[in-house]
């Protein structure tokens, strides 16, 4: 049966192209969300700044990236209210609220830095954003493409980032020596990085990264005991790292990775998205081994971002049911159901498609609330890049 097509119940056009979005966590002002924007301006200034040449070149083109952080409130109706805009001298490529300090969120910038902001409320319970930290993790010519907060409560200020140079770097924005680790993962852009759901042993954790080189990398034993060794030397090479890369499973660049704890013998699977338009379910590779593909489905567009919406698991029957939101570039947004049967067979089904966007859907998120009849109601907010559109929509019986 064909997946139902959905129309928006509210929408607006932004002044700059949206690249990322996230709602405030539960317990804060949950009807607020932040949108990061990305604007690329090409100017002719007579100098080739990209190549570092200073002689006159009348036809040289300079790329200038800028952006903004936009704070919205989703009110009943629904109605979209823009509460605050912070203009930035860089583009914003990714943003995520902290895992343990829910009023804090970090952003990935086009100028090689990570910005850290607080989300607060005034005496009238109106939310606002405020910048309070910035870490320069790479040369300003390098883009920070994604970020992921550390999964351990003992390291609430530690963040992993992936770079346009192909590297993965780990930083602590509160440490005197901010940069903790540098890992050369990919030969082309490292589009995404994420921590394993399996936790850490002695602060040694597993990282996954995906790149434009179609490579999925597993970084084992990423230990971060302190920002400095006891003799004062940098920690960057203190802990040996085992890196294993799968170059065969994906047919194009890897743009999204979502780890899921399966509950079976403490195992973990990965959901991956790629420019090849496939959503895949993988058992992550061990060192020196190729990933095992459990199931895959073509979603109609490059799978840029994945977000887990819900999980139901039967321990006795070993069944598992997941609901996932996929931002699928030119194809729009997909709501996907993933099931594991009693026989340990996996299946992927598209539940709904939102295709009102007229350009690249790079970012989507949801707000869940309880209705007066005690049922959970989900509101979806999705964006598209070149037409600068922000849409609100719902799924019947969702």
Image (cartoon, rainbow, N blue to C red):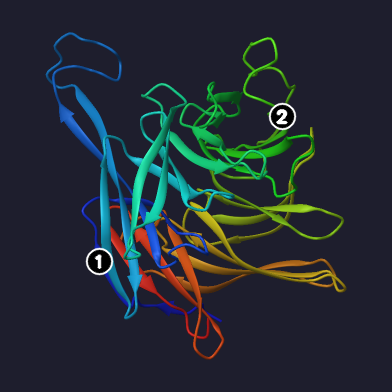
Vertically, is 286 above or below 12?
A: above
- Residue denoted by label 1: 12
- How packed mark 1 is, by other alpha carbons closer than 10 Å (few <14, some 14-19, many 20 or more), is few
Alpha-carbon neighbours of circle 2 within 10 Å: few (<14), some, or many (≥20)?
Answer: many
Q: Residue at x 71, y 18 (%)?
A: 238
- Left or right: 20 with respect to 231? left
- Asked if residue 318 can be seen in this view, the reply is yes
Q: Which residue is tagged 2?
A: 223
| Residue at 36% over, 77% down | 7
Quarter residue 388 falls in: bottom left
Q: Marks 1 and 2: in contact by CB < 8 Å?
A: no
Q: Closer to the observer: label 2 or label 1?
A: 2
For residue 175, which numbered disc appears in the image?
Answer: none
Write down the quadrant of residue 192 in the picture. Answer: top right
Residue 357 appears anywhere in the view: no
Between residue 331 and residue 373, name the one nearer to us: 373
Query: Can you say whether 34 is above or below 113 in the image?
Result: below
Residue 396: x %, y % from top left: 48, 84
Q: Is residue 183 above or below residue 29?
A: above
Residue 280's image quarter?
bottom right
The x, y position of residue 154, in whole percent, is 67, 40
Element under label 1? strand
Give the x, y percent position of residue 83: 27, 60
Query: Residue, x 73% and y 25% (percent of image)?
Result: 241
Judging depth in this view, the residue of 43 and 177 nearest the camera is 177
Determine whether the residue tagged by mark 2 lies in a helix, strand or loop: strand
Q: Furthest-bottom residue in view?
A: 373
Looking at the image, the residue that sits furthest to the front is 123
Q: Is residue 338 left or right of residue 60?
A: right
Question: Could you tell me how far apart the alpha carbons at marks 2 and 1 are, in whole angstroms?
Answer: 45 Å
Q: Horizontal placement of 246 versus 8: left or right?
A: right
Quadrant for the N terminus in the image? bottom right
């Amino acid at each position: 049966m064909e997946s139902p097509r959905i129309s928006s119940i509210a929408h607006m056009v932004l002044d700059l192209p949206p690249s990322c979005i996230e709602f405030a966590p539960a317990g804060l002002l949950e009807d607020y969300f932040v949108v990061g924007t990305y604007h690329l301006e090409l100017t002719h200034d007579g100098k080739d700044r990209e190549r570092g040449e200073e002689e006159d070149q009348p036809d040289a083109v300079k790329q200038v990236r800028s952006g903004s952080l936009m704070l919205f409130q989703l009110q009943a109706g629904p109605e979209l209210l823009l509460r605050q805009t912070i203009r930035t001298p860089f583009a914003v490529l990714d943003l995520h609220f902290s895992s343990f300090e829910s009023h804090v969120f970090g952003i990935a910038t086009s100028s090689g830095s990570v910005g850290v902001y607080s989300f607060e409320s005034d005496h009238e319970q109106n939310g606002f954003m405020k910048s309070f930290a910035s870490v320069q993790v790479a040369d300003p010519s390098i883009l920070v493409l994604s970020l992921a907060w550390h999964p351990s409560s003992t390291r609430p200020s530690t963040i992993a980032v992936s770079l346009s140079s192909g590297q993965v770097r780990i930083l602590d924005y509160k440490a005197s020596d901010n940069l903790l680790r540098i890992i050369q993962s990919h030969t082309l852009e490292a589009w995404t990085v994420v921590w394993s759901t399996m936790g850490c042993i002695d602060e040694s954790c597993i990282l996954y990264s995906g790149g434009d080189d179609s490579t999925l990398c597993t970084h084992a034993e990423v230990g971060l005991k302190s920002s400095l060794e006891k003799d004062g030397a940098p920690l960057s090479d203190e802990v040996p790292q085992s890196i294993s890369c799968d170059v065969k499973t994906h047919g194009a660049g890897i743009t999204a990775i979502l780890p899921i704890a399966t509950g079976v013998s403490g195992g973990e699977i990965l959901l991956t998205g790629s420019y090849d338009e496939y959503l895949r379910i993988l058992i992550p590779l061990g060192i020196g081994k190729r990933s095992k593909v459990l199931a895959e489905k073509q979603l109609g567009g490059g799978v840029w971002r994945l977000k887990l919406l819900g999980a139901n698991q039967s321990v006795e029957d070993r069944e598992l049911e997941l609901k996932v939101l996929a931002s699928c570039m030119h194809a729009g947004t997909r709501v996907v159901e993933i099931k594991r049967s009693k026989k340990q067979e996996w299946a992927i089904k598209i539940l709904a498609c939102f295709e009102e966007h007229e350009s690249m859907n790079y970012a989507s998120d949801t707000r869940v609330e309880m209705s007066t009849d005690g049922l959970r109601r989900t509101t979806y907010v999705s964006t598209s890049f070149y037409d600068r559109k922000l849409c609100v929509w719902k799924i019947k019986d969702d």
